[in-house]
Amino acid sequence: MRKIQISSKYPQFDTRGERVLFIAASKQHCEVYKVGKGNITKTYEFHVEKPTHLERDSQFGNRGVGVGSASIQDMRDDEIKRLFERELKKIVKELSQKYNPTQIYLYATPKTVSTVKGALPKDWQVAIKKTIRGNFTNEHPFVLLDKLIAAS
């Protein structure tokens, strides 16, 4: 993908042996950036579509109490979360074969933080240096750097 040179007003992440990842995630969207040597490169991106087989006005919709009372929205959210985790694990597996990060900065919505951390292997979870809550998907990488500086 496209490599962007980091402006000199930001940290350059150019220390020898330092392998840095930024992960920006929301409920259905995720972007992964490699950061280092004065550059930031988006290496992976995915979007999980809403499942179409769970329609709001299905036969289970809006029952009172009892069997089948689980909300369709809850079922849809669980399905999205499952698909998101599966896609993220696939990307992490592929990326870890050639790149093992020493530092990870996680940018995620409050409801997504635990999902993302749960999809990461233990050594990646330990490498998380900072978690910044909010929806930063589809933002320019310099916005991520601004948020990192503001949180420091």
Image (tube, rainbow, N blue to C red):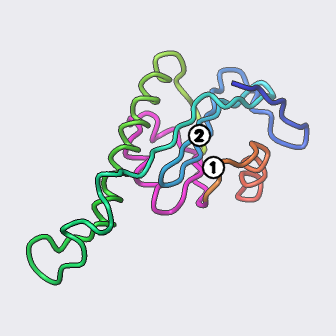
Q: Position of residue 108 (x, y in %)?
A: 55, 54
Q: Secondary structure at mark 2?
A: strand
- At a point 41% along the width and 54% down the height, the residue shown is 114
Q: Residues within 10 Å of mark 1 (few under 14, many from 20)?
A: many
Q: Position of residue 2 (x, y in %)?
A: 74, 26
Q: Which is more toward the observer, 132 or 111? A: 111
- At a point 61% along the width and 57% down the height, the residue shown is 135
Q: Position of residue 31 (x, y in %)?
A: 59, 40
Question: Would residue 104 appear left or right of 147 to someone viewing this image?
Answer: left
Task: Inspect the magenta stretch and tell me whether residue 31 lies in it.
Answer: no
- Residue 18: assigned label: none
Three-letter code, disc 2: Glu
Q: Name above or below for residue 52 compared with residue 2.
A: below
Asked whether the residues under the numbered discs 2 and 1 touch, taking CB atoms below 8 Å apart as contact, a structural biologist would say yes
- Residue 137: assigned label: 1
- At a point 62% along the width and 28% down the height, the residue shown is 43
Q: Name above or below for residue 94 compared with residue 76.
A: above
Residue 140, image quadrant: top right
Q: Name above or below for residue 28 compared with residue 11.
A: below
Three-letter code, disc 1: Thr
Question: Would residue 71 appear left or right of 44 to someone viewing this image?
Answer: left
Residue most extreme to the left: 67
Residue 40, image quadrant: top right
- Residue 31: assigned label: 2
Question: Would residue 131 appear left or right of 118 to someone viewing this image?
Answer: right
Question: Would residue 74 appear left or right of 42 to someone viewing this image?
Answer: left
Q: Which is more toward the observer, 128 or 108? A: 108
Work out whether mark 2 precedes mark 1 in sequence or the reverse, and give the earlier one.
2
Q: What span is colored magenta in the figure?
A: 106-134
